[in-house]
Image (tube, coloured by chain):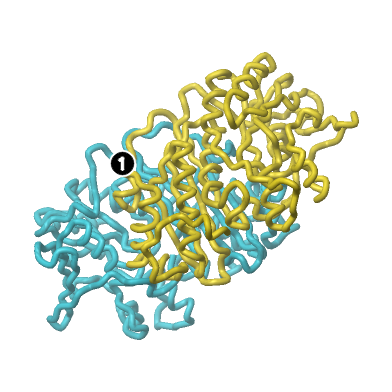
Chain colours: A yellow, B cyan
Amino acid sequence: MNPDNWTCPLPLRDYPNVVLGHGGGGKLSAELVEHLFLPAFRNDALAALGDAAIVPPVAGRLALTTDCYVVRPLFFPGGCIGDLAVNGTVNDLAVSGARPLYLTAGFILEEGLPLAALGDIVARMAAAARAAGVAIVTGDTKVVERGHGDGCFVTTAGVGAVPDGLTLGPERARPGDAVVVSGAIGNHGIAIMSVREGLEFETIIASDTAPLNGLVNEMLAACPNVRVMRDPTRGGVAATLNEIAGRSKVGIEIDEACLPIDPQVWAACELLGLDPLMVANEGKLVAVVPPSDADRLVAAMREHPFGARAAVIGTVSDQHAGMVVARTAVGGRRVVTLPVGEQLPRIC
Amino acid sequence: MNPDNWTCPLPLRDYPNVVLGHGGGGKLSAELVEHLFLPAFRNDALAALGDAAIVPPVAGRLALTTDCYVVRPLFFPGGCIGDLAVNGTVNDLAVSGARPLYLTAGFILEEGLPLAALGDIVARMAAAARAAGVAIVTGDTKVVERGHGDGCFVTTAGVGAVPDGLTLGPERARPGDAVVVSGAIGNHGIAIMSVREGLEFETIIASDTAPLNGLVNEMLAACPNVRVMRDPTRGGVAATLNEIAGRSKVGIEIDEACLPIDPQVWAACELLGLDPLMVANEGKLVAVVPPSDADRLVAAMREHPFGARAAVIGTVSDQHAGMVVARTAVGGRRVVTLPVGEQLPRIC
């Protein structure tokens, strides 16, 4: 945490740190809402302060998602738990083909968290929501005793609208399809690990946390036949590809030489003995498209800042159904397995 | 926690307790979803296992809400954190006038939580969702290291549909209106406190956790002019009435002799020095209605099991705007203040 960056004005100086009463539903809770959450997230639905936020009718099917964020440390190069939580939920909606509309935010705070840190987290959530074009319309805050939490946990849920006729899903890959990734992989996981373990590299490796709904719009406009989109977060690209292979009952072959990976991420993975395919991403997506559409899709993605390094990394096969195989740089082949547990706990 | 009640079959015997990998997005996460969450919550939207659940279009305005649950202990007389989380979110939607439809569920687990306990929590969430007629369509699980959480935190979010033309809100109370409560107050808070503090009474005081959407339906059918509904959870009836008085810029006068309170809850409050008006409820609501509608509303509520002890407890006044005043049993008057912090931490 970098106190220099704590930007939210806090007329809550009687309590510089979070106390149990901030989650008690009384005056202290109300002050937190009035002076911290409302000014940051300001929108009409939130300002009504009902037990639920009321928003206008949404046309079409709804997409609903939720994610809990327990990343440690709370602030890291390229982001913090707040923008991560907003972008993560925006991305889960976007890769489902939905236009993200509304988010909810739940905070579980540990007694003693500096209110200014919470203010900064909330300010960055608000900025991320603005950047993604979504509104944070309702929320809740609970406080647990010191030693029964870990600073700040954030749970976001999101609602989006799915365009008529669009269906994406991990069960839709077909032999011959191309597998595309939107950019360099592994940056988020390595950013977290390097700050947590005190590793120093020549350049700071920053998290790739970003909202992907704009990129997804461009992709669907250029290529309405996209079959699958997923964001490879926990478990990395390896987990995502294994899921697609399993759900679609197909094999997937990827070419490691085609994987966009930043040199310093490569170096860190070698140093730490990590497989970059298993390292988490927070601003990337994997897509599967019919082979005839692959070039058009990649070209459209490269027009967007979050897809500038998009690349075809492999193909879907009718061999070895349910299995992901990588051609290695030296010409061998290896099976890319689903991680059993967790390479790195509390990555998001 | 009562292991005798742990009912969920768990073919996860290699890991009897939660390990970090259960939140890692790999095989262990997938097993938890397959063997624990899917069988309990089973529905089509969840079974698709997308990054987001896709549900059919919803007509009309949407209501969105979220709540974090950190109640301690996890299991208590009358309920557990799981049914509490479902009912709480159902009730936030219901008192906003919405028909609750879909819930999301986020779990932040502490390493070492018995998987069977999680199974029981999830089974009770599923039962509560069935009872309320809602579907839990998507979720997420994260695991934190031992000592960085507290067993299990649950965050639910909910989506409901608001009927055309219906508008409720704490700013809509008018002088002369009647203030109604749906039943005996204080049971949830006293149930939690007595089990936590090891207090013994002649009878076990159970939480009142219950879904109120059925009761709300009956209320709106009998009395479409209801102006305000709120569920008096944290901060109790005192916090709810103060909010209504403040937002509507009116005074509220209540008659303590009219408050439905169970004798053992009274006794516990006296013993513990608690004001029952400030004790949390999890299956009650407060409503404000035009005076001409009050009798009809109370009669309709009494037809419903969760409104059997509904009563008019006071009136809205044009005096002392923003303030709640109680006539005491001995004929005096006292100001009912908004609690500053928290009478009892982690009540929900």
Question: From the viewer's perspective, is A94 left or right of B64?
Answer: right
Residue B73 percent across, percent down from the top left: 51, 70
Vertical side of A102 occupied by A35: above or below: below
* Front in this rendered view, residue A204 or B29: A204
| Residue displayed at 50% across by 63% down | A109
Q: Which residue is disc 1 drawn over?
A: B162
Query: Is residue B5 shown to the viewer in this render?
Result: no
Question: From the viewer's perspective, is A113 left or right of B111?
Answer: left
Amino acid residing under circle 1: Val
* Front in this rendered view, residue B154 or A213: A213
Q: Residues within 10 Å of mark 1 (few under 14, many from 20)?
A: many
* Front in this rendered view, residue B57 or A123: A123
Q: Quadrant of the N terminus of chain A?
A: bottom right
Q: Mark 1 lies on which chain?
A: B
Vertical side of A43 occupied by B108: above or below: below
| Residue displayed at 34% across by 62% down | A30
Report which quarter residue B162 is drawn in. Answer: top left
Label 1 element class:
strand
Report which quarter residue B306 is drawn in. Answer: bottom left
How many marks overall? 1
Query: Is residue A86 shown to the viewer in this render?
Result: yes
